Image (cartoon, rainbow, N blue to C red):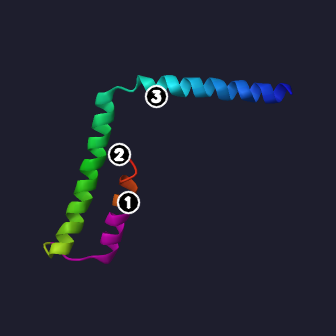
């Protein structure tokens, strides 16, 4: 019983701290974070677009790598 109470209190304290931290994030930091993620995505799309237009030689491995980066980056913003 005492172990369960300790675990509950630890979880409660962690939850309260997480809420306090989440409210402390300033909007300008969130904006810069999203802008950085979207800028990186646009760079990856630029490389894929250049391959699609024939402006850059097509490389299957590089295209797969760039597409996987875009897929992962799309989760960030």
Disc nearer the start of the sequence (3/2): 3
In the picture as drawn, the residue positioned furthest to the left comes out as 55
Q: Indicate the secondary structure of the residue bearing disc 3.
A: helix
Q: Are marks 1 and 3 in contact (CB under 8 Å)?
A: no
Question: Does residue 38 appear left or right of residue 53 in this picture?
Answer: right
Quadrant in the rendering for residue 28: top left
Residue 69 at x, y percent in the picture: 36, 59
Image position of 11 with respect to 35: above or below: above
Question: Does residue 73 appear left or right of residue 17 in this picture?
Answer: left
Looking at the rendered structure, which numbered label has been put on residue 35? none
> Circle 3 sits on which residue?
22
Residue 19 at x, y percent in the picture: 52, 26
> Circle 1 sits on which residue?
71
Q: Indicate the secondary structure of the residue bearing disc 2.
A: loop
Instruction: Please say whether residue 50 is one of the residues in the magenta stretch.
Output: no
10 Å neighbourhood of mark 1: few (<14), some, or many (≥20)? few
Point 48% across, 25% down: residue: 21
Quadrant in the rendering for residue 42: bottom left
Q: State the separation of the CA atoms marked 1 and 3.
A: 26 Å
> Circle 2 sits on which residue?
77
Q: Magenta stretch? A: 56-69
10 Å neighbourhood of mark 3: few (<14), some, or many (≥20)? few
Point 20% across, 61% down: residue: 46
Point 17% across, 69% down: residue: 50
Image position of 37 with respect to 24: above or below: below
């Amino acid at each position: 019983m005492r172990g369960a109470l300790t675990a509950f209190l630890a979880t409660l304290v962690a939850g309260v701290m997480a809420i306090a931290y989440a409210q402390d994030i300033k909007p300008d930091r969130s904006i810069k974070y999203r802008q950085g993620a979207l800028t990186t995505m646009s760079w990856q799309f630029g490389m894929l677009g250049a391959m699609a237009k024939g402006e850059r030689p097509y490389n299957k491995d590089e295209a797969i790598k760039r597409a996987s980066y875009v897929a992962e980056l799309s989760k960030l913003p």
